Amino acid sequence: MSAGTELLSDVGRSGIQILTGEVIHNWTLIADGNEEAVEVTVSGANMNDYALVSCSHDVADCVLDANVTAAGVVTVVAANNTGGNITIGSTADTTVKVMVLTAP
């Protein structure tokens, strides 16, 4: 294994924790060039931690980005740069899940 890589089974021994959170969100129409944000509570998350995001519906070529923006808060942004209007999940409730890896 190269420097800086770890097996998932080694995460706990390295001091890294895996934290999770989720929220149900009803995305609105996102016009081309615009974005929409939703906040997800993740207890124990802090600035400088790593954040990953997944969505229960097709994101229709939008870019999803997740960042810890405050203690215990991950902000997920859906950015639409497709050239047209997009509604993620066709206005249906969507589960937005985040995983945070704490920085060692």
Image (cartoon, helix red, strand yellow):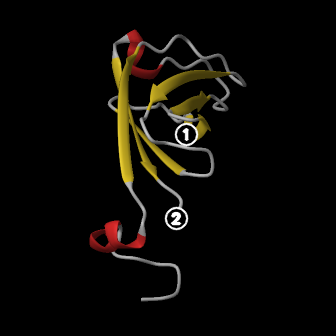
At horizontal 67% and vertical 32% (from top left) the residue drawn is 81
**Helix, strand or loop status at disc 2:** loop
Quadrant assignment, res 34:
top right
Q: Position of 19 compared to 51: left or right?
A: left
The mark closer to the camera, 1 or 2, is 2
**Circle 2 Cα neighbour tier, 10 Å, few/some/many (<14 / 14–19 / ≥20):** few
Q: Nearer the viewer, residue 61 or 75?
A: 75
At horizontal 34% and vertical 72% (from top left) the residue drawn is 13
Could you say where residue 50 lies in the image, as x and y percent from the top left? 53, 52
Question: Badges 1 and 2: C-beta atoms under 8 Å apart?
Answer: no
Quadrant assignment, res 12:
bottom left
Residue 7 vs 36, above or below: the answer is below
**Circle 1 Cα neighbour tier, 10 Å, few/some/many (<14 / 14–19 / ≥20):** many
**Helix, strand or loop status at disc 1:** strand
Q: CA distance from mark 1 to mark 2?
A: 19 Å
At horizontal 34% and vertical 14% (from top left) the residue drawn is 93
For label 1, the residue is: 66
Quadrant of the snapshot with the N terminus: bottom left
Q: Residue furthest right?
A: 33
Q: Nearer the viewer, residue 25 or 87?
A: 25
At horizontal 45% and vertical 41% (from top left) the residue drawn is 44
Q: Position of 18 compared to 101: left or right?
A: left
Q: Position of 76 compared to 99: left or right?
A: right
Could you say where residue 72 lies in the image, as x and y percent from the top left? 50, 34
For label 2, the residue is: 104
Residue 91 vs 19, above or below: the answer is above
Could you say where residue 60 lies in the image, as x and y percent from the top left? 48, 31
Quadrant assignment, res 89:
top left
Tell me the amino acid under the disc marked 2: Pro
Tell me the amino acid under the disc marked 1: Ala
Name the disc covering residue 84, or none.
Answer: none
